[in-house]
Image (cartoon, rainbow, N blue to C red):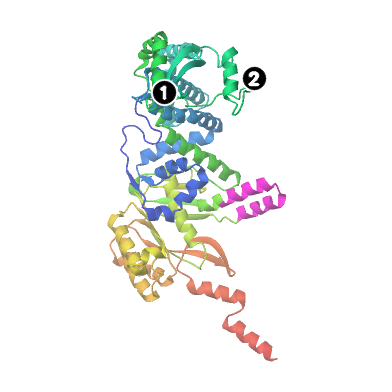
């Protein structure tokens, strides 16, 4: 099979960078992978693909279209899931076929199994792709390949040969052994008495001997025998075991004609290997697990969309109805619990929770490519910051994203600066550790990167944090990367016109605020000057602690 991938189109140069461990943690990559699959092996596969941020638009569109087909055809997914088990067994079988210590008979039988699975997989993939009106280049290329293999005359002969050989080999059902003992009844020699076309049974003297040997203290009065004990599994026979090594040699000699026939027929297919198909296992797992899970997300009623990928040099992003994918995960979990309990009250609660997911519109362009986001505590700043990172990561993996509509230029990587674990700040101190991580980000980030700062520099005094943060914002203007810098320092978002006019750069800094209405957090964002004081005023009015309200209470109490 020629080199083929459902993640990378042929002759297209990949441009990917691996996320740092900090970015993986800040974007909750492990958490998401655990939701997609309960199998650690599959989780690792999905994670390894997700953390390699691919920035080539051609590759991203190729992936997106493959996912689009797999997502829209559940029957296709189910058929491929069934083939994955066979492909996984084929991968394990490869070790046995390449085992130089195994006897020729076992090598040939394993080779026969390999070809048999190969035939089944080619047939299954061909049938499943033919039955659906696929549109993606990747699946069309796979369809063309398996179709050409399936339809060529050699494949038809292979199918017939396998059927015939399996039938002949399958006639061997048991082997009778003879064991010589010394005067202490210790086995000293073993030999094959016969090769049989029926499973082992208890004729005459042998039956009596077995019944006798199964009794611990006296001659057994009955004729029952509990059964045989397994000593090896198929595909594991090698020269490591002296008994099995000798057995393999004798079987090979006694089945001389059968071995010769296997060699002659299988020699026709020396150039055919099913193992190249196994390279598609991780890619199928990635697409299928994502498609399965996004089906659940769709069922709870929140939007998903196919991302529109534009050129890198535009460095833009225009999103409508964006939200944090982790909120969708929470809804899926609650919905599944509701189905398990089968209680109408729980279902009603789920519907109410769905309405609580706030959809936001956000744009990155030359007029506001760098956002200083302010707002009340627990007003959604961190949730939105993470949401932007997740939407880029998912889109550039080719997956549907949590939004109503989205158009974006790929980023070359995602850099995050979230509060660090206290254990990591012992040597440098909190401010030193934060400053060092910031410095490292600016060493590698480009104007095509995505930078996400979450309450950075909040661990030092306000004056020190503001001083450093102002310099960081100036550097961001100079760099020009898409950025969200969410902060409690409202002063940082004031007088941004100075930064935009005095610092060189082609990307403007803008103030983004999370809203509050009548003292309640709305979780809606909009471009406007920071309103730190007005937030406090709204909350003070709600709880009756403005100066006027307090004076009124005092006067009322005195009356």
Along the viewing direction, whichever of 389 and 362 lies nearer the viewer = 389
Instruction: Say whether residue 344 is magenta.
Output: yes
- As drawn, the residue found furthest toward the front would be 183
Residue 161 as seen in the image, left or right of residue 329: left
Q: Quadrant of residue 492?
A: bottom left
Question: Which stretch did the figure color magenta?
Answer: 330-355
- The residue that appears at 60% across and 28% down in the rendered structure is 217
Disc 2, SS: loop
- As drawn, the residue found furthest toward the top would be 257
Residue density around tag 1, few if under 14, some if 14–19, many if 20 or more, within 10 Å: few
The label shown at residue 243 is: 1
Q: Do the residues labelled 2 and 1 touch (CB within 8 Å)?
A: no
Residue 228 as seen in the image, left or right of residue 527: right
Query: Of discs 2 and 1, which sits in the foreground?
Result: 2
Residue under circle 2?
Answer: 223
Q: Quadrant of residue 255?
A: top left
Compared with 453, 295 (above or below) is above
- The residue that appears at 61% across and 25% down in the rendered structure is 226
The label shown at residue 212 is: none
Q: x and y percent of residue 246 in the render?
A: 39, 20
Compared with 384, 218 (above or below) is above
């Amino acid at each position: 099979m020629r080199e083929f991938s459902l993640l990378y189109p042929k002759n297209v140069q990949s441009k990917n960078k691996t996320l740092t461990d900090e970015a993986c943690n800040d974007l909750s990559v492990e958490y998401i992978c655990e939701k997609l699959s309960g199998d650690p092996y599959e989780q690792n596969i999905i994670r390894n693909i997700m953390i390699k941020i691919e920035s080539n638009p051609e590759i991203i569109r190729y992936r997106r279209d493959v996912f689009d087909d797999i997502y829209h055809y559940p029957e296709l997914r189910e058929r491929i899931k069934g083939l994955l088990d066979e492909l996984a067994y084929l991968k394990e079988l490869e070790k046995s076929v390449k085992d130089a210590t195994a006897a020729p008979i076992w090598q040939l039988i394993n080779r026969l199994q390999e070809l048999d699975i190969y035939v089944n997989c080619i047939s299954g993939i061909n049938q499943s792709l033919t039955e659906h009106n696929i549109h993606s280049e990747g699946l069309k290329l796979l369809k063309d390949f398996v179709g050409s293999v399936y339809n060529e005359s050699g494949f038809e002969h292979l199918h017939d040969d396998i059927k015939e050989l399996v039938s002949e080999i399958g006639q061997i059902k048991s082997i009778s052994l003879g064991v010589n003992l010394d005067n202490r009844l210790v086995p000293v020699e073993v030999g094959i008495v016969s090769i049989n076309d029926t499973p082992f049974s208890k004729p005459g003297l042998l039956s009596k001997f077995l019944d006798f040997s199964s009794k611990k203290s006296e001659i057994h009065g009955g004729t029952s025998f509990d059964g045989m004990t397994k000593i090896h599994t198929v595909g594991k026979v090698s020269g490591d075991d002296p008994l099995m090594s000798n057995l393999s040699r004798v079987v090979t000699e006694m089945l001389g004609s059968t071995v010769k026939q296997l060699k002659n027929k299988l020699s026709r297919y020396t150039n055919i290997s099913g193992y190249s198909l196994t390279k598609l296992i991780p890619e199928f797992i990635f697409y299928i697990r994502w498609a399965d899970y996004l089906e659940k997300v769709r069922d709870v009623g929140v939007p998903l969309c196919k991302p529109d990928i534009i050129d890198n040099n535009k460095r833009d992003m225009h999103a409508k109805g964006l939200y944090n994918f982790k909120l969708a995960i929470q809804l899926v979990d609650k919905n599944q619990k509701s189905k398990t309990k089968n209680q109408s009250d729980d279902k009603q609660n789920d519907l109410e929770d769905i309405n609580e997911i706030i959809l936001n519109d956000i744009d990155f362009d030359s007029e506001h490519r760098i956002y200083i986001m302010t707002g009340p505590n627990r007003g959604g700043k961190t949730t939105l910051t993470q949401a932007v990172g997740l939407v880029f990561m998912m889109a550039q993996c080719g997956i549907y994203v949590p939004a109503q509509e989205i158009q974006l230029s790929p980023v070359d990587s995602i850099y995050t600066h979230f509060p660090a674990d206290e254990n990591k700040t012992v040597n440098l101190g909190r401010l030193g550790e934060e400053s060092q991580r910031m410095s490292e980000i600016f060493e590698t980030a480009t104007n095509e990167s995505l930078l996400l700062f979450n309450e950075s520099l909040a661990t030092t005094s306000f004056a020190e944090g503001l001083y450093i943060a102002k310099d960081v914002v100036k550097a961001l203007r100079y760099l020009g990367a898409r950025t969200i810098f969410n902060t409690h320092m409202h002063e940082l978002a004031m007088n941004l016109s100075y930064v935009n006019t005095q610092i060189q750069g082609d990307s403007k800094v803008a103030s983004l605020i999370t809203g509050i209405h009548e003292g309640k957090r709305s979780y809606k964002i909009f471009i406007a000057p920071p309103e730190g004081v007005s937030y406090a005023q709204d909350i003070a009015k709600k709880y009756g602690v403005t100066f006027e309200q307090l004076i009124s209470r005092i006067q009322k109490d005195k009356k």
